[in-house]
Image (cartoon, rainbow, N blue to C red):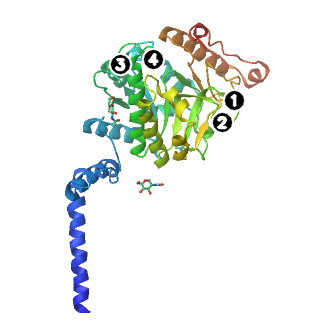
Amino acid sequence: MVVHKSMRLRYAATGALCTAFIFLPYLAIYHSPEAYSLLSRSAFSQHLNRIFGTSGNQLLFLDDTSNFTQEELGDLQRVLKNAAFKNRTVIITTLNQAWATPNSMVELFLESFRLGEGTRSFLDHLVIVALDQVAYDTCISIHKHCFTLKTEGVDFSGEKFFMTDDYLKMMWRRVDLLRVVLQFGYDFVFSDADIMWFRDPFPLFSMEADFEIACDKYFGDPTALTNEPNGGFVHVRANNRTIDFYKFWYKSREVYPGKHDQDVLNEIKVTSGFMDLGLKMRFLSTEFFGGFCQVSTDFGKVCTMHANCCTGLTRKLQDLRLVIEDWKRYKSMTDLEKQLQRVFWRAPRECLHSFEG
Ligand SMILES: *[C@@H]1O[C@H](CO)[C@@H](O)[C@H](O)[C@H]1NC(C)=O
Ligand SMILES: *[C@@H]1O[C@H](CO)[C@@H](O)[C@H](O)[C@H]1NC(C)=O
Ligand SMILES: *[C@@H]1O[C@H](CO)[C@@H](O)[C@H](O)[C@H]1NC(C)=O
């Protein structure tokens, strides 16, 4: 009995030592609990692979960060931590040079938060992902949470015309980045910068949904796959299903070359591979999350307004300025006036002439 007990103790001690040997270096390197949760698990699995010669994926919790440098991952983590609401939710947008010049998109975007009802404080929780140096410099001069994302061999600084090669790379890099954000454990709302925020969207999100997406065209049923989604505005909860979905989505770009993320989403949303993920997907009504494709008809409800179905920066800017003015006009009305007078958006106006179909 005594011998047996001491044997057990020795086994236990050996086990503890092994565990310490495997874990300690990572605990020492990554102090913050968040850093530990992601980086160390990846490093940890590589370490295990080295020790035990295990190859393959089964131990790789964070499969692929190979397209991001350690520096980028560290920066991303720091920025997310500073910007997140207490419940680990962040608002994220991307910005390039063309949208960052004075009097351009980013100013209207930030302005909308200040003019919206209860949206001003969201600026404290907004991360701007800058795609080039000018965008980054602009960001740090006007905003406090800026992250710079480089893509090798791609110059994102010009106005990216719809469907050019570089434009596609930019869209896909964004999908890949958002996957990493989820793996860090942050829920997010991603919003293109050509979306004006006028009200708090959070009360409109479903507790049941993993992934909620705005629509170009919405046909009344939040679960119907026939809705036409627009990836410019999504709300995503961080969980295994959404992480797997983002990987699946990103991987699917190889199956549909030359298509951007939104078109690929439209293709994959009806495939069995997608169904197998069990992702709880909801489409957001254009009555609240409207755009130029299908405008919200009710100023009393509208939450966001997207300059979608519009190509050309100048046209977008002209019409979004109308949107901002219309919103200001609505806000300046008394409650009685709001009841008696129906308000209409003047936009899309210039954008009407820009889009086929
Ligand atoms: C990294 O980027 C390259 C070039 O865009 C791409 O071909 C590759 O699949 C990416 N790797 C991962 C793991 O996403
Ligand atoms: C996270 O916090 C924000 C701000 O307090 C709130 O609007 C949002 O609904 C919260 N999200 C969840 C999932 O609780
Ligand atoms: C998510 O995946 C991890 C690793 O595969 C697993 O340990 C965990 O239980 C999963 N969580 C949920 C909620 O399924």
At label 4, counting other C-alpha atoms closer than 10 Å, the crowd grade (few under 14, some 14-19, many 20 or more) is few
Mark 1 lies within 8 Å of ligand 2 (Cβ measured): no
Mark 4 lies within 8 Å of ligand 1 (Cβ measured): no
As measured in the structure, the alpha-carbon distance from the residue carrying label 4 to the one carrying label 3 is 13 Å
Q: What type is the residue that disc 2 sits on?
A: Ala
At label 3, counting other C-alpha atoms closer than 10 Å, the crowd grade (few under 14, some 14-19, many 20 or more) is many
- The reply to whether the C-beta atoms of the residues labelled 3 and 1 are less than 8 Å apart is no
* Ligand 1: quadrant of the figure: top left
Q: What type is the residue that disc 3 sits on?
A: Phe
Q: Position of residue 273 (x, y in %)?
A: 51, 42
As measured in the structure, the alpha-carbon distance from the residue carrying label 3 to the one carrying label 1 is 35 Å
Q: In the figure, is residue 97 to the left or right of 211?
A: left
As measured in the structure, the alpha-carbon distance from the residue carrying label 1 to the one carrying label 4 is 26 Å
Q: Is residue 43 visible?
A: yes
Residue at the image point whose x is 47% and y is 28% from the top: 261
Disc on the earlier residue, 4 or 2: 4
